[in-house]
Image (cartoon, rainbow, N blue to C red):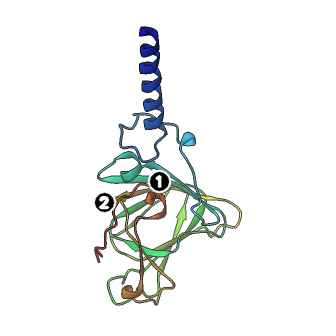
């Protein structure tokens, strides 16, 4: 009888450990060192995108910063959007273009400025500035490490650069946070 109890305790501990490790929304401590290649990737229905949450607020329990690894195939990119956090891109390989509307705080974004992005460059996007990243290099992927402040990110998308801010669509939680987020927030932070 004692052997069965011991086996049951060991089996229960194993199952609980497996479940906690398998949870993609766990806030357990993140290991000090992880292999990015072992983290899940997804395109979230956006052709040409490969997204990995390296350090996430909802996925891993980070409070002040979130880090993503994103790869854009030639011709692909982000939607025109803004969010209530700062964003920094570190370009690891390839090249592309950042479109940034510097007059984002008027009634609509307006004509964006174009900034080249290239390997070993960094790009900063201020809070609530409407922007878009595109891989404009036809021969190579654009791979960036993305760092955002104040996660989880609340994204407002635009159909074009002349769309009024009041018509922008809120996407929250964002695609890679959907499965982890329990309650929705309706606060617009612009």
**Label 2 vs 1, first from the N-terminus:** 1
Q: Which residue is mark 2?
A: 150
Given residues 60 and 84, the one toward you in this image is 60
At label 2, counting other C-alpha atoms closer than 10 Å, the crowd grade (few under 14, some 14-19, many 20 or more) is some
Q: Secondary structure at mark 1?
A: strand
Which mark is on residue 158? none
Question: What numbered label is drawn on residue 68?
Answer: 1
* Residue at 41%, 54% in the rendered image: 180
In the rendered structure, the answer to whether residue 62 lies left or right of residue 81 reads left
Q: Secondary structure at mark 2?
A: loop
Can you tell which quarter of the image residue 173 is in?
bottom left
Relative horizontal placement of residue 113, taking residue 43 as reference (left or right): left
Q: Position of residue 62 (x, y in %)?
A: 33, 48
Residue found at the far top of this picture: 2
Rendered view: 83 above or below 180: below
The answer to whether 134 is drawn above or below residue 50 in the figure is below
Residue at the extreme front of the image, as rendered: 1
- Point out the image quarter for the N terminus: top left
């Amino acid at each position: 009888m004692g052997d069965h109890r011991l086996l049951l305790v060991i089996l229960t501990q194993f199952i609980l450990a497996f479940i906690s490790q398998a949870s993609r929304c766990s806030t357990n401590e993140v290991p000090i060192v992880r292999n990015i290649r072992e983290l899940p990737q997804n395109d979230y229905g956006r052709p040409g995108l490969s997204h990995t949450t390296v350090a996430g607020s909802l996925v891993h329990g980070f409070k002040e910063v979130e880090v993503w690894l994103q790869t854009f195939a030639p011709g692909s990119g982000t939607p025109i959007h803004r969010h209530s956090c700062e964003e920094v891109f570190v370009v690891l390989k390839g090249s592309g273009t950042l479109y940034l509307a510097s007059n984002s705080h008027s009634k609509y974004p307006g004509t964006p400025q174009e900034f080249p992005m290239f390997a070993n460059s960094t790009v900063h996007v201020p809070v609530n500035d409407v922007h878009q990243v595109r891989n404009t290099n036809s021969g190579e992927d654009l791979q960036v490490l993305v760092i955002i402040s104040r996660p989880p990110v609340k994204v407002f998308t635009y159909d074009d650069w002349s769309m009024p801010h009041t018509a922008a669509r809120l996407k929250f939680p964002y695609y890679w946070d959907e499965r982890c987020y329990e309650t929705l927030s309706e606060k617009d932070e612009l």
